Image (cartoon, coloured by chain):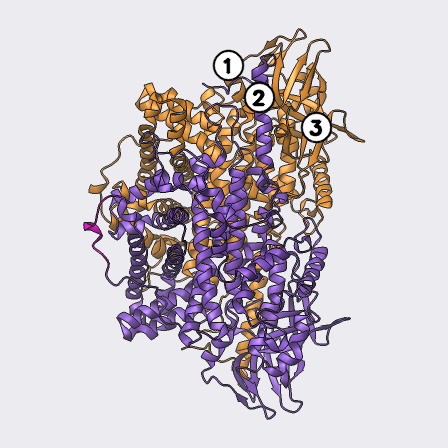
Chain colours: A purple, B orange
C-alpha cells in the first residue's frame, strides 16, 4: 500500500495536490473498526435492512405509513430483534450496548420505525423493566415484547416539556378501594406528543404526582390500560397530534385522565411503593435523588438518538460525496472538467463535515461503552451514572444538530437532485428534525452540562461556592441531575503560548490541539464561575437575572466541552488503527476536525491571547492549502468505510449513474469534434 | 407615546432591563412602512389569502395537492391576480414591481402555489413576453394568462444546472421545411426539474443551441407544444420527478425531444432571429452579451425568491415570538415564572434573527425598486441592469439561506409544538429548502458577486488586471454576466482604528459600523485580487487551480458584500421613520444586526487589527447586556408590524391559546394553595 507520506509535496504555485486515486485506506478494516464493540448487533440490523420490508416507502398517506410502521415492528419481533436488552427471564439477552447499537441502525430503514420501536421497547417496555419489579416483568413484559400490547410512554405534558418534576397529572391513592386515581387537572397537563397514543396504544406508562394521605411524594410511573378493541377505556380521552414535520409513521397523540382507577399494583414500584394502608416507602430517602434515579434509567433514549444521528450523517455524506465525485459542474469550458468535489468550496462544504462525523462516531462508541458499563452493572457507581448523564447531555445535542446541518449541506451540495425524494436526503432531514428536541431539548441538555462543569470547577477550586452555583443552574434547567468530575482532563497549567514555536507546525501537533481546546473549556468555566459568584449574596430574582444574563455563555461552554469530548474520542481512536497509511489519513481528518473547532472559535483564541494573529491566519490557510487537498483523494474511501449497501442508501444519485451519463455526454462531444461534420456549441461566451 | 430613551437605566447589578409592556412602537405605521412602495399589491394578495381557497391543506396526497394547486392558479386568474406585469395590449398593467410584490406574498398561502404561478407567469409567460415579439404576444399570451395553456420553462438539464450556456439540447434549422428541429442528444441533456412538465404543461419554452447552416449561435428560446388531451405529442417524452422534499403541489418533471419539429416562427426572436433562408441575425452582435441579455430578463425569479424568503421569515418569527411570549418553561420553581422569551438564550436565538429579517425586508425593497426601475424602462442603462444582477446575486443567497435558518430556529424554539403541522413551521421549511438552489444555486450566485467585486476593484485600482481577473472568475462560474461598479461605497480610506475612542460607544455609532463592515469587504477583495494576480502569467490549469484554492474566500467576500447591502438598506430605512420612539427601537435593532455581523466575523477584525481584544469582547457584552434587554419588550410589537392576520399564519400556537392554558394551570395551583385542603406538588427537588 502506498505510503501517503511519501507522496510528492504540494506544488508551490497552486498549493493544490493533484487528485490521485488511492488505495491508501484500508477501508474494510477501517469499516470494521467503525462498527465498534457491538459490530455484530449492527450487522444484524444492517442485514435485516437489506429486506425491503423495513424500508420507508415514499408517498404513503399518513394512515398507511402508520400501519406499515406498526407492521414493521411486528416484523422486528418475528426477526427476534427486540429482546436484546431484556432480562433472560423473559427471553432477553441483557445486552444493553448491543441492543442500542442494533436499534440505532434502524434509522436507515425508516426513522419512524426506529423511533416507534424505541417508544415500544426503549421507553414503554424499558420503563416497566427498570421502574417496575418482578411482578410487572412477569405479568407485562411478554405482551410488550410480542407487541400484543403496544404502549405509550406518557411523561411529557403540553405545558411541561423539559420540566418533568412539575407535571400536573396526579395519581391519588384511595385506600378504601386499594386503587390509584389518575387525573388530569387542567388542559396544560394533558400528556402530549406520545408515540402510540393516537391509535395503536393499548396501555401507557403514565408519570404522575403520587399522592397518598394528603402528601405528594413526587413523580412516579403507573401502568395504565388505555384502550381495548372498541377504543378508549372509560375516563380516558385523547387527541391525535396529527401530521408532523416528519416521523409520520408514528401515531403521536395526547392523553388525558378523568379519575381513572388502576389497582395499587400498577405502580411501578422499584423506587417507591405504597402499601395497602396508603403508607409510602422508598429505598431512596431523598425525593430529589429518587426522581433522578428514576429518570436516569431512561438515558438510553439519548444514547440511541446520538447513535442514530451518527448513522444518518454517515449516510448523507456517502450520498453527497459519491455524487460530488461524479458530477461535473460545467462541461462547456476546457479547464473546468473537474468533478464537484475538486472545487475548493465543495471540499470546504463536505470534508470538515466528514471529519465531524468520524469524531461523532468515535465519541458515540465511548458513550455507548459507558452506557453499557452502567446498565450491565459492571461500572455503575453513582459517579459512573453521573458521568454517563453528562456525556449524554453533551453529545446528544451536538450530534443531533450536526446531523441536521450535514443532511442539509448534503442536500444543497447535490443541487436539485438532492431535493428529490428518490435521493433520500430530504426525508431523513425532515424525520431527524425533532431529534434536537425530544429526549431532552438540546439547549436544556447543554445547560445540564454547564451545571456539571461549574460544580466540578467549584469543587476543585473554590469549594465554598459549589452548592450555590450548581443549584442556580439547576433551577434554570429544572432537571438537577447531580454530577461530579465532568470536566474532562482540564489542563491545569496553560502553556505559555506566546513563547512556543511560531510556525503553523505548532497547531498540527495533537498535544497543542488538546491544549487549545481544553484550555478554552477551562477558561470559559472559570470565567463564568467568577461572573456568577455574586449570585450567592443576591436575592433570588436578582440571582436568577444574573444567571439568565449568562445563559448563552453557559451553553457555549457546554458546547465547547462536548466538542472536546469528541476530539478526545477521535484522538484516542487513532491508536487503534494498525495500518500506518490509514492512520495517517485519519490523523489528517482528526486535524481537520480539531483545527476546524479552533478556526470556528478563532475570535476567542485571539481575544484571550492564545493565538497570535499570524498563527490564527495560518490555521485557515493550513486547512485550505494542506488538509483539504490531502484528504480529498480519500473522501470516497472514507465513506466506503461506513459500509453501506445500496439497500441501505437507496439513493439514485449514489449508484454511479451520474458518471455514466457524464461519460455519454463527453463521448457525444468527442464524436462531433472528431467527425468535423456537425456543429458544436461555441465556447462559453467571454467578455 | 413613551420615549424609550427616557426609560430608567439598566440596573447595574444584573444588567437586565425589567420587561415592560410598551406602546413605544407605532406598529401600524411601521407595518405600512414595511409593506413598501407596492403596499397595495401586497395588500391585494393578503386579502386574497384570507380566503381558504388559497391555503395549503395538510395531508393531501401528492396527486390531490397538485390538482389543488392547479385549481388555485385558476382561482388567481379569476381574481385578476396574474396580469399585473403584462403588456396593456393583453390586459396587463405593466406594473413590474407590484407584480413581484403581490406574487411574493402568495408564499403565505402555499409555497407550491407561489412557485407554480411563478413557473406559469413569471418564467414561462415572462419568457414569451421578454424573449418573444409582438407575434408571440398576440398569439400566445392570452392562453398563457388564462391558464388555458399551462407551460414549462425548459432551461435546466439533468447535466447542467447552473451552466446554461453549455446545455446539450439542439434546435437545428431546416430550411427546406422552414422548421426548427428540437433534439436531445444524450441522457444528461434531458430537461429536468421543470414545473408543469410532469402533468399539466401543454407547451414549454425550450432553451436550446440554435444551429443554422452548420453554425451554432448559442442558446435561444423556442416555444414548443408538448401535450394535448391524450398526452405527449409525437417525439416528446418525459418523466415525473416524483416526490420532492417540499413543493409537492408542483408537478416537476423531465422532458426530452426526439427530432421534434416546430415552425420557424416559434423561435422567440427578440434577441436573435433566423430568416427563411436560414440566415441568422441579432440586434446584439456579441454572442456573450446576447446570451446574458436574454438571461437578464429572467432576474425576476431571483427578486421574488428573495421577497418570499423575507415573508416566510416574518411569519416564522411571528409564530415563535408569540409562543415565546406566552409559554412558561418551568412552573415548579418560584423565581422562574418568566416566559421563554425572558431567557437570555431564547433572546439570543430569536432577536438577532428578527433584526436580520428587518434588514432583509428593507434590502428587498431596495432590490425591488431597482428591478422595477429596469423593467419599467425608467432606469435601464446597461449599468443599471448589471447592478440589478449583482444585487440579485448577492441578496437571494443570503435571504434564502437565512429563511431556512430562521424557520429551523423558530421550529426548535417552539419545541415539540413547533414540529406539529398545525403550527406551520415545518412545512414552510420543507418548501423553502430548494429556494437555496433554484433560480441560481446560492454558492454559484455568490461567485458572480465576487467576480463583479474583483472587476470593480481591478478597474479602480489596477486597470491592467481587470480582464484577466474577471474572466477567471467567470470561467469558474459559467455565467459571465458583465458588471460594473458593484462595490457599494467602498471606504477609500480606512480610519486609524487604533486611535479612535476605546469604549464600546465607538461601535454603537452607525458611521463606525459602516466603516467596519465596508472596510472588511474592501480588504477582502483587495487581498484576493493580490492573491489572484499571478494567474495572468499561469497556464490555464494552473490559473484554475489558483482560483479554486481561493474559491471559498471569494464566496465569503461576496457574502460580506451582501451583508453590507442589507446593513445599508436598514440604515437608510431609519430615515423614513418619523416617530422618534419607533425610530429608537429600530435603531437598536439595526445595531443588533450590524454588531451581530461584526461579532460573527470577530476573528477577521482582530487578525486585521481593526478591533482590539478589549473592544471585541465589549461587542458581545453590549449585545447581551444592552441590546437584547432593550429590544425584548418590543419583540411582539416588532412582529405585529408584519401585519399578518390569523388566516395568514394559521398556526395554532400563535393564537394566544397557550397563554390561556398557562393561566388555567396557575389558577388551579392558586386554588389548591388557597384552600389548604388539597395536596400540592412538592417543590422541585434540589440537591
- To which residue does mark 3 refer? B144
Mark pair 1, 3: CA separation: 32 Å
> Chain under label 2?
A
Query: Residue at the location (64% across, 82% down)?
Result: A181
Q: Position of residue A26 (x, y in %)?
A: 46, 47
Among numbered discs 1 and 3, the one appearing first in the sequence: 3
Residue bounds of the magenta highlight: A494-503
Q: Is residue A133 magenta?
A: no
* Residue B348: quadrant of the picture: bottom left
Q: Which residue is mark 2?
A: A669
* B166 lies above or below A145: above
* Residue A256 circle label: none
Q: Are marks 1 and 3 in contact (CB under 8 Å)?
A: no
Res. B263 image quadrant: top right
**Which tag is nearer the camera, tag 1 or tag 2?**
2
Q: Secondary structure under badge 1?
A: loop
Mark 2, secondary structure of its residue: helix
Can residue B487 be seen here?
no
Mark 1 vs mark 3: in front: 1
Q: Main secondary structure of the magenta part?
A: loop
Mark 3 to mark 2 CA distance (whole Å): 36 Å
Horizontal and vertical percent position of residue A325: 51, 37
Q: Which residue is mark 1?
A: B286
Q: Relative to the observer, which residue lies in front, B213 or B75?
A: B213
Q: Quadrant of the C terminus of chain A?
A: top left
Amino acid at each position: 500500500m502506498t505510503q501517503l507520506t511519501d507522496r510528492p509535496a504540494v506544488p508551490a504555485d497552486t498549493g493544490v495536490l493533484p487528485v490521485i486515486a488511492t488505495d491508501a485506506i484500508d477501508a474494510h478494516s477501517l469499516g470494521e473498526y467503525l462498527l465498534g464493540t457491538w459490530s455484530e448487533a449492527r450487522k444484524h440490523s444492517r442485514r435485516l435492512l437489506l429486506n425491503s420490508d423495513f424500508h420507508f416507502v415514499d408517498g404513503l398517506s399518513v394512515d398507511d405509513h402508520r400501519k406499515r410502521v406498526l407492521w414493521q415492528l411486528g416484523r422486528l419481533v418475528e426477526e427476534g430483534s427486540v429482546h436484546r436488552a431484556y432480562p433472560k427471564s423473559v427471553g432477553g439477552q441483557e445486552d444493553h450496548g448491543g441492543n442500542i447499537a442494533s436499534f440505532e441502525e434502524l434509522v436507515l430503514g425508516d426513522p419512524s420505525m426506529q423511533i416507534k420501536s424505541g417508544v415500544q421497547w426503549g421507553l414503554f417496555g424499558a420503563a416497566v423493566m427498570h421502574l417496575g419489579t418482578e411482578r410487572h416483568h412477569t405479568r407485562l413484559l411478554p405482551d410488550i415484547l410480542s407487541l400484543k400490547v403496544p404502549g405509550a410512554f406518557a411523561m411529557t405534558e403540553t405545558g411541561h416539556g423539559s420540566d418533568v418534576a412539575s407535571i400536573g397529572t396526579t395519581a391519588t391513592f384511595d385506600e378504601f378501594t386499594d386503587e390509584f386515581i389518575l387525573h388530569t387537572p387542567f388542559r396544560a397537563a394533558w400528556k402530549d406528543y406520545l408515540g402510540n397514543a393516537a391509535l395503536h396504544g393499548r396501555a401507557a406508562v403514565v408519570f404522575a404526582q403520587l399522592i397518598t394521605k394528603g402528601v405528594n411524594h413526587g413523580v412516579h410511573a403507573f401502568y395504565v390500560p388505555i384502550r381495548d378493541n372498541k377504543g378508549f377505556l372509560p375516563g380516558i380521552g385523547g387527541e391525535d397530534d396529527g401530521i408532523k414535520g416528519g416521523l409520520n409513521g408514528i401515531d403521536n397523540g395526547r392523553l388525558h385522565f378523568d379519575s381513572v382507577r388502576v389497582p395499587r399494583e400498577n405502580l411501578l414500584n422499584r423506587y417507591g411503593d405504597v402499601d395497602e394502608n396508603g403508607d409510602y416507602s422508598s429505598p431512596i430517602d431523598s425525593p430529589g435523588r429518587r426522581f433522578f434515579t428514576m429518570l436516569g434509567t431512561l438515558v438510553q433514549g439519548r444514547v440511541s438518538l446520538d447513535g442514530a444521528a451518527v448513522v444518518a450523517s454517515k449516510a448523507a455524506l456517502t450520498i453527497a460525496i459519491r455524487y460530488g465525485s461524479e458530477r461535473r459542474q460545467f462541461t462547456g469550458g476546457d479547464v473546468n472538467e473537474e468533478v464537484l468535489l475538486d472545487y475548493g468550496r465543495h471540499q470546504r462544504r463536505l470534508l470538515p463535515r466528514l471529519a465531524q462525523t468520524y469524531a461523532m462516531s468515535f465519541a458515540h462508541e465511548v458513550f455507548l461503552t459507558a452506557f453499557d458499563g452502567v446498565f450491565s452493572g459492571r461500572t455503575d457507581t453513582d459517579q459512573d451514572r453521573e458521568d454517563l448523564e453528562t456525556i449524554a447531555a453533551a453529545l446528544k445535542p451536538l450530534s443531533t444538530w450536526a446531523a441536521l446541518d450535514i443532511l442539509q449541506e448534503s442536500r444543497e451540495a447535490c443541487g436539485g437532485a438532492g431535493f428529490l425524494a428518490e435521493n433520500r436526503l430530504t426525508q431523513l432531514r425532515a424525520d431527524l428534525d425533532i431529534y434536537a428536541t425530544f429526549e431532552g431539548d438540546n439547549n436544556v441538555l447543554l445547560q445540564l452540562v454547564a451545571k456539571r462543569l461549574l460544580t466540578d470547577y467549584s469543587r476543585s477550586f473554590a469549594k465554598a461556592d459549589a452548592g450555590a452555583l450548581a443549584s442556580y443552574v439547576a433551577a434554570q434547567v429544572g432537571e438537577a441531575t447531580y454530577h461530579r468530575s465532568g470536566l474532562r482532563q482540564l489542563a491545569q497549567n496553560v502553556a505559555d503560548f506566546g513563547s512556543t514555536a511560531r510556525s503553523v507546525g505548532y497547531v498540527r501537533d495533537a498535544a497543542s490541539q488538546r491544549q487549545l481546546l481544553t484550555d478554552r473549556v477551562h477558561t470559559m468555566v472559570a470565567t463564568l464561575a467568577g461572573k456568577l459568584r455574586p449570585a450567592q449574596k443576591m436575592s433570588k430574582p436578582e440571582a436568577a437575572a444574573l444567571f439568565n444574563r449568562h445563559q448563552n455563555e453557559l451553553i457555549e461552554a457546554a458546547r465547547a466541552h462536548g466538542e472536546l469530548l469528541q476530539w478526545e474520542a477521535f484522538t484516542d481512536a487513532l491508536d487503534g488503527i494498525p495500518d500506518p497509511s490509514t492512520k495517517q489519513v485519519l490523523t489528517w481528518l482528526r486535524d481537520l476536525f480539531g483545527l476546524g473547532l479552533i478556526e470556528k472559535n478563532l475570535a476567542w483564541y485571539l481575544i484571550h491571547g492564545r493565538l497570535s494573529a499570524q498563527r490564527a491566519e495560518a490555521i485557515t490557510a493550513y486547512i485550505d492549502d494542506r488538509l483539504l487537498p490531502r484528504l480529498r483523494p480519500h473522501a470516497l474511501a472514507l465513506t466506503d468505510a461506513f459500509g453501506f449497501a445500496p439497500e441501505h442508501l437507496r439513493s439514485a444519485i449514489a449508484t454511479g449513474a451520474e458518471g455514466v451519463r457524464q461519460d455519454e455526454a463527453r463521448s457525444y462531444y468527442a464524436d462531433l469534434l472528431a467527425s468535423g461534420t456537425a456543429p458544436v456549441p461555441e465556447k462559453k461566451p467571454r467578455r
